[in-house]
Amino acid sequence: MYPRKERRNILVPPNFSLKKARLAQKRIAEMVIEKDEIEFPIRYAVGVDVAFLEDLSIGAAAVVRYPDLSVVEKETVAVKTVFPYIPTLLAFREVLPAYMALRKIKTDYQLVFVDGNGRLHPYRAGFACHLGVIIKKPTIGIAKKLLVGRISEWKDIFAYIYLDDEIIGAALQTRKGCKPIFVSVGNMITLQTAIKLTLAFTKKGLKLPEPIRQAHLAANEYKRKLAS
DNA sequence: GCGACAG
DNA sequence: ATCTTGTCGC
């Protein structure tokens, strides 16, 4: 039926159609704008992340100010999990909680960092593209593991990721002694700009860009609050 | 057919 | 992602 792991805490909805999901991803991939349509100068960037607790999906969003990288706002939400984790279909599981957390943000942000891939996806329609097309805002995908593609030659801390002779993302060793992170275009941005901004939003000595790191912390904070 | 596979 | 304490290294 669907890929990997038969032990899931949730089943695909009875009305789910893989064919339709792929068509949706194809449309999303076509809607992605790979041009810099960002409002410069960037003053605020928000990071979104999703955590899980039993049958709940916890969406978190954290706004970071540039260039000092201090946290100015954090919002969280909890909704019932409606879709299992299936590689390449991550967005169908996480977009709703991420979108709802983002909707609570009052700060006027110019950029969104998403915990997952953008174009670094077999159909060029990862979570960051999916969310980016929905909210019509510049998004950057940040993943901690490689989903698809091949890492080319490393040039210092940098290496492009190729898939079908096409550059779909980049690996960045943001911290010495750590595995790299994988950056890719979500929407309304260029890979080059996405790389520069990722580095600009990553604190020295830390691996992840601050918006993502803070969203992750906020999600876990809210999670243990619910658990207690 | 087999293995790989974001969070 | 989640289950979990201390511990090795820069």
Image (cartoon, coloured by chain):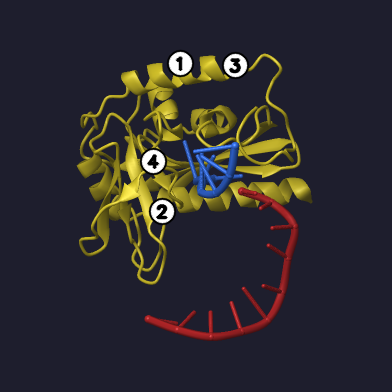
Chain colours: A yellow, B blue, C red
- Name the secondary structure under disc 1: helix
Work out how far the residue at label 3 is from the one at label 4, CA to CA, in angstroms.
25 Å
Work out how far the residue at label 3 is from the one at label 1, CA to CA, in angstroms.
10 Å
Are labels 3 and 4 on one chain? yes
User: Badge 2: few (under 14), some or many (20 or more) residues near its Cα, within 10 Å?
Assistant: many
Toward which corner of the image does residue A156 lie, by quadrant?
bottom left
Measured along the vertical axis of the image, is residue A30 above or below residue A205? above
- Name the secondary structure under disc 2: helix
Q: Chain of mark 2?
A: A
Q: Which residue is mark 4?
A: A141
**Residue A216 placement, left or right of A224:** left
Q: Amino acid at mark 3?
A: Ser
Q: Residue at x 71, y 36 (%)?
A: A56
Q: Position of residue A133 (x, y in %)?
A: 38, 23
Measured along the vertical axis of the image, is residue A201 above or below residue A19? below
Q: Nearer the viewer, residue A114 or A110?
A: A114
**Camera sees residue A65:** no
Q: Are marks 2 and 3 in contact (CB under 8 Å)?
A: no
Q: Which residue is mark 3?
A: A17
User: Badge 3: few (under 14), some or many (20 or more) residues near its Cα, within 10 Å?
Assistant: few
Badge 2 or badge 3: first in the primary sequence: 3
Badge 1 or badge 4: first in the primary sequence: 1
Q: Which residue is mark 2?
A: A210
Residue A23's label in the rendered image is 1
Q: Residue at x 37, y 49 (%)?
A: A182
Labels 2, 3: front one:
3
The number of discs equals 4
Q: Amino acid at mark 2?
A: Glu
